[in-house]
Amino acid sequence: MRIYLSPPDVSDAEREALVRGFDSGWIAPLGPEVSAFESELAETAGRSRCVALSSGTAALHLALLNAGVGPGDRVLTQSLTFSASANAVMYTGAEPTFVDSEASSWNMDPDLLADALASKDNTYKAVMTVDLYGQCADYERIEAICAEHGITLIEDAAEALGATYRGRPGGSFGDTAALSFNGNKIITTSGGGALVTDSDAAADKALFWSTQARDDAPHYQHSELGFNYRMSNLLAALGRAQLIGLEAKVDRRRDHNKFYRAALGDLPGFEFMPEIEGGRSTFWLTALTIDPDLAGVDRETVRLALVEREIEARPLWKPMHLQPFYSSNKMIGGGLSDRLFDHGLCLPSGSTLANQEREEIVGIVRAAVAAA
Ligand SMILES: *Cc1c(COP(=O)(O)O)cnc(C)c1O
């Protein structure tokens, strides 16, 4: 049977939750499950408010609109990420400027961020960090830098629900954070996301925009551009069942990471994504780099050996500054994310991955190295 990188982890509890949502009669989009899911998510992310949405990308979009980002503006975001982070900036008509990663977290380099904001041509409107593979960025420094410059900070925590950094949960950093419940994330609603914040004004506005910006009137009246971004009641019921198992799901992914480190860490040239000081990553995906000069094999050889055995393994995110669509955007710093992309590999890490499956994976990787 094919082994996937991060498949959904659902059981009878989720099935029953969906049926409960169905039987309650709240099939029409909103309903009590949405409000309950929102309170539970707000608590998990250490925030006072949550707005459940149709995707994590929608949450990023509304977070940017809340920051006043619009046509002609520039937003600093990290290059090494999934395209959704940068695309959300484009939806507002603004332009993403990319920042390289730092070696200790693989997330936005705080020194490069500080330089960019201190420079004469700082016309940036917001900063969007990404918690790569479930690891929080260096918020100790990044929050302080953003506060010093009075610039809005948005946390793309799509992969980091259940992570912590210096005692605070993933989703609690910056002005607003975005969560994702896409099918491959830590928990899933089959598709969905949420915006979390401590600002009542931001949450109220996100709610307004996400339901087509309907003014308070008996007829349909609109003074602003709206979106159809709200999560449905049925999917919120599914999300609530998933959330109950969040801790166990994160623990399982962390256990995979520990296993892979122990089973492959001795191989020359193999280096795992470091865990930032004070942080507890979800290890949404276990990521490592393979230095071909030391290992005797390159990443592609190892990846293809896995793919040949029906095991899904992928390179790290291709940095945005290397994407054809974003190739003319400004890139600050450079080098590290390029190298991570050249040599990086993500291994199957889902919470449903069995012990015997991960042993098989390790066996294939070691055989590929030995054959070199
Ligand atoms: C998955 C993901 C998103 C987008 O979330 P969707 O719910 O799929 O829209 C955004 N950023 C990162 C880093 C992601 O991994």
Image (cartoon, helix red, strand yellow):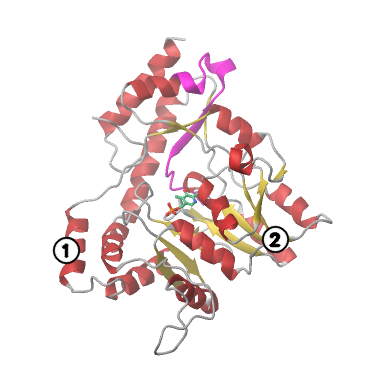
- Tell whether position 299 is magenta: yes
Q: What secondary structure is marked by label 1?
A: helix
Tag shown at residue 72: 2
Tag shown at residue 242: none
Furthest toward the bottom, the residue is: 218
The image shows residue 361, relative to residue 274, as above or below, that is: above
Q: Which amino acid, mark 1?
A: Val
The image shows residue 167, relative to residue 342, as above or below, that is: below
Q: Residues within 10 Å of mark 2 (few under 14, many from 20)?
A: few
* Real-space CA distance between mark 1 and mark 2, rounded to the nearest whole angstrom: 47 Å
Q: Is mark 1 within 8 Å of ligand 1?
A: no
Of mark 1 and mark 2, the one earlier in the sequence is 1
Q: What secondary structure is marked by label 2?
A: loop
**Residue range highlighted in magenta:** 279-301
User: In the figure, residue 235 lies in which quadrant?
Assistant: bottom left
Q: Which residue is mark 1?
A: 19
